[in-house]
Image (tube, rainbow, N blue to C red):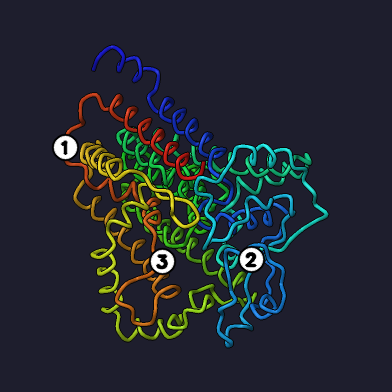
Amino acid sequence: MNSFEQRIEKFGVEKIFIVIFLLFGVIILFMRPPYQLMDEINHFPRAWQISEGIFLSPTMTIGDYKNGGDFRAKKIFSLNRAPADALEDKIYIAEIPVSFLPDNFIFNANNRHYIHDFSIKYIEEFLATPLNLDEQEPIQIPNTGVYPPLTYLPQAVAAFIGRVLNLNAGIIFYLMGLSGLIFVAACVFYSMKFLPEAKHLIFLLAMMPMFVVEAASTSADAVTFGVCFLGTAWLLSLRNSTEKFSRAEIFGLIILSIMLACSKSVYGTILLLYFLIPRERFKNFWALGAAILLLNLFLLSAWSWLSIELSDVKLYTNYHLGFTETNTAAQKIFIMEHPIAFFTAMINSFVELPAWYWLNFIGTWGFLWNVTLPFMFYALYTMILIFFALSNRLNLKFSERGILIVASIISTIGFFLVHYLKWSPVGSEIVSGVQGRYFIPIALMMFGTLSILPSMRHRNLIALSAGIFSGVMMLLANFFAFY
């Protein structure tokens, strides 16, 4: 280690890491056109709605929409092809000020993607647009209306503050994205503090373009990514102590269980890492572990009952878009009668779509994933991730690796199962709709299991260089896609 690296280590390399993360996050937040991220046009209204204290989304029927509902988001989610027997199905809606929806930002998913068409003047005009709470428009949020309020906590708080201060619409929008970025940055920073032996790996995962772009947005993925990384790192760190559990640690486990329940439900498996903790740390170890798992499951079930069963809303699926070969009820029966067929479809998806999953994991964005990076970047960054995964210093036992692998597999099966039910034709041999970014919340568990080599030399400089390289490539790809 040379003198420069020694100074970096003494100063605290994780501090430098997080400054780099925030720097590129802030730039991409203002550089990326609003709503040019998968489903952001539905995430933002849900966050705004929660900031107004509306935790359970109002609903309307698809038939009402087809019979003249004036919804700006119909240019994105078109329900005109919904079958006749789905017209009475309810969908979630949210009302937001029209000032958040300049004509330059509302686009047709089939014809207009802002490729070489966006100008910085649009952002300047948006920042100067007054917030007009008197003129509101309903927006369809069929796929995000079911999300719990805590999923948008930082963005909703920022929206509330902006509304109280009567800030301009554009300022509130970017303040919401900035709040998500700061939340994620805090989670990443403390992940590195809790798990210093894997801090370089954590930083490189956080500097993937997909991670940074989602973190600097109003998407629910910001909170999900942050909570999952922090929860994984903290639980892994607890295995290194033999002291009795403190009240703060027990309280932290409860909060983590709640936050994971309010993120996407399939990531509750991170709580299985509790069983890496030495048994002697708590007298009623197994009872506490069962309690935090049951709390997570209870909250998931309770929110599902409140937001779906009580509201009489059917989950939004491909069937509502006119793909009548998709039928959730029939698919459930098919899986129960042919469970092997589902697992075969999942394996087939990995065999036929590995490149798509990996590219979307590292970084593809835009409303239709139309922003990609050069293939050489994906290849180089993949190699760097693997090297740091192989040489992280977690020193896991065989049983500990097993728990990490099992937790990762259960989450993977979970989101493949959900998408098989909602987006795939009955009996399909491929699972439709799964995106590579779904693997990001469990990435630290997956990559952490690979540690078999000693630490590489000059790891601080290599990680810093790789992270900056990724950030620069992200900004260049965004610029050439949209400007």
Q: Which amino acid does the dot numbered 1 rest on?
A: Leu
Quadrant for residue 176, please give it.
Answer: top right
Q: Which amino acid does the dot numbered 2 rest on?
A: Gln
Where is residue 35? Give x, y as percent.
57, 51
Looking at the image, which is closer to me, 58 or 444? 58
Which residue is pictured at 29% across the width and 73% down the height? Answer: 345
Looking at the image, which is closer to me, 256 or 371? 371
Looking at the image, tell me whether mark 3 or mark 1 is earlier in sequence order.
3
Which residue is pictured at 24% across the width and 51% down the height? Answer: 401
Looking at the image, tell me whether mark 3 or mark 2 is earlier in sequence order.
2
Q: Which amino acid does the dot numbered 3 rest on?
A: Gly
Quadrant for residue 121, please give it.
Answer: top right
Which residue is pictured at 57% across the width and 67% down the height? Answer: 77
Looking at the image, which is closer to me, 473 or 450? 473
Looking at the image, which is closer to me, 184 or 483? 483
Per the image, the residue denoted by label 3 is: 433
Circle 3 crowding by C-alpha within 10 Å: few under 14, some 14–19, many from 20: some
**Would residue 41 appear left or right of 430 to someone viewing this image?**
right
**Would residue 464 appear left or right of 39 to someone viewing this image?**
left
Q: Is residue 175 visible?
A: no
Where is residue 56? Give x, y as percent.
66, 65
Real-space CA distance between mark 1 and mark 2, rounded to the nearest whole angstrom: 50 Å
Real-space CA distance between mark 3 and mark 1, rounded to the nearest whole angstrom: 36 Å
The answer to whether 278 is drawn above or below residue 207 in the figure is below
Looking at the image, tell me whether mark 1 or mark 2 is earlier in sequence order.
2
Q: Which mark is residue 140?
A: 2
Provide the secondary structure element on which disc 1 rests: loop
Quadrant for residue 473, please give it.
Answer: top left
Per the image, the residue denoted by label 1 is: 453
Where is residue 288? Give x, y as percent.
43, 56
